[in-house]
Image (spheres, rainbow, N blue to C red):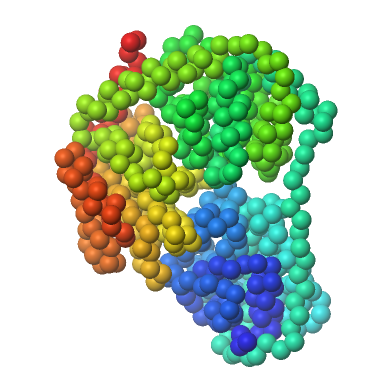
Amino acid sequence: MILSDKKAIQRIVLALAKLGLRNVVICPGSRNAPLVISFNRHPDFHCVSIRDERSAGFYALGKAIETRQPVAIVCTSGSATLNFAPAIVEAYYQRIPLLILTADRPKEWTDQGDGQTINQTNIYHNYIRRSYDLRGDATDESDIWFNDRSISEGYHIASVKDRGPVHFNIPMHEPLYGTGEVKNTEVKVFSCADVTAQLSQIELTQLATQYAQARKVMILVGQHPKEEGFQQVLSNLAHCSNTIVLTESTANVAHPSFIAHIDRCITHLDVDKAVDLMPDLLITVGDAIVSKRIKSMLRKHRPAAHWNVHPYDATMDTYQSLTTAIHIAAVPFLHALSQQLNEIVSSGFRQKWLQLKEKKDRLHEVFSDSCVFSDFKVFDILFKSLPKDVSLHISNSSPIRYAQLFDYTGIKETHSNRGTSGIEGCTSTAIGAAAAAPEKQFLLITGDVAFHYDSNALWNEEPIDNLNIVIINNSGGGIFRIIPGPDTTQERARFLETSMKLSAEHLAHQYKWNYMSASDTTSLHEILPSFFRHNRTILEVFTDADTNPQVLAAYWDYLQQKH
């Protein structure tokens, strides 16, 4: 096998192969040439070339989300390293395993006026699980041992121990382009057991007793990958009269007994009703919650007890009421808890929520059927037309908020970059996920600003034939017309909303994507069957920026009806 002639680089690549790394995303450059040569020529790696480092980072994020395995990203020295930062921050807060390999100039040349040379040591320090300065030209036993150990340790931190991005910075001297045969190179790596935490029987009994005696239990499910057994254990608990389960689309669970549209139910509740629907015991599982309203209500009406169940972040106190941090994965904990429950207190809590849900669902359908063409109507039509088992990606800002108002029972899995909730990499993430699972069909729903912000996602050498994109073009950042505050300032249109009149048509043709468009209810209904029959297709739906906030405001008002 012919790799780089730098022995240290050979060992780094061989170690990662031995540990199980398979996907590598490579950005162009010269200082990273030894890594590029070695990864590309090693038979165990699937390498993809992506020109834009920011897009590459999110592409790798999408692959890691879909495969649930570490993905490596490789770049040259200098400012290229900082272009990875947005994806690294997202991976940090979502706990997605990324391995960042940044080539570096020799340390003695930092801050000495040499080109493409910056201080790269611990460059991502606030948003990284661990950072290593490897010895790129290692020859003595001590440096070789350090590199071998660091690669093993970092890989296991990223994938098991602390899950998230890990950085390997690798300074290298020239020459960079030499190659050599790998001879008798035995790389030492170590394994890491993934030990599942368990509560003692005494702890479990105490928690089960507290649960059974609580008259109002709310299980709030945040972002969570689809997982076998998760929906079943939640539905078992949801049948208890004292328990209600609140979910969102990114929780990837659905059941008739769950409150799947939180804002639909709680918007404009009067004070007495709100207090009645708030829990004595709050159990939170999963990660980010989209609904700002439920966060505000739970902070205002704090439960007497709050258990946060999370294998890594159980001490997070989002609702200012944390009483018990449970460092266990959701499924084994909830299963063990359900097995311990006896003689649950009789309560009407579940029934009150379900009665409210039934009323709001009925009002929602009446309003949806009659509302004018708008962002709201587009989501209504889309969610009623989605093919079964599509894997859905939703961009941030207004699309993910609208998505919470509509049914998603036929969707295979839903993802949104809710770690930091930015718009900058939504398309790249979806394309990375689609590339990782060619047997699946993917759909991205995005806005015009998010799409154009990440248009380099289409500038990609790997053919993607299992992803379609819907762009809801409302001529700018529509979120600033539906949240309170921006409409009070004269700077909204130019500086916040960044109003624009652009179409994605020419970009689609440039990058060899099919393109369709719609601008009213009739044309959208007519075009959707053809859109879903084709792959690698962009559908751009044009809505009116002034109408959209009026329709959404009318919707919230309509949900207040007494009958």
Residue appearing at x 58%, y 34% in the figure:
232
Instruction: Give residue 305's position: percent from left, percent from top.
Output: 67, 21
Residue appearing at x 57%, y 25% in the figure:
238
* 535 is higher (above) or lower (below) than 37: above
The image quarter containing residue 240 is top right
* 432 is higher (above) or lower (below) than 421: below
Instruction: Give residue 311's position: percent from left, percent from top.
Output: 68, 42
Q: Which residue is more in the foreground, 253 or 14?
A: 253
Q: Is residue 73 visible?
A: yes
Q: Which residue is more in the foreground, 216 or 275?
A: 216
Q: Which residue is more in the foreground, 557 or 246?
A: 246
The image quarter containing residue 307 is top right
State the quadrant of the N terminus: bottom right
* 175 is higher (above) or lower (below) than 319: below
Instruction: Give residue 516's position: percent from left, percent from top.
Output: 21, 54
The image quarter containing residue 71 is bottom right
State the quadrant of the C terminus: top left
Report how many numbered discs are placed on residues in the image: 0
Residue appearing at x 44%, y 59% in the figure:
439
Instruction: Give residue 323's position: percent from left, percent from top.
Output: 70, 26
Q: Is residue 319 visible?
A: no
Residue appearing at x 32%, y 13% in the figure:
561
* 512 is higher (above) or lower (below) than 332: below
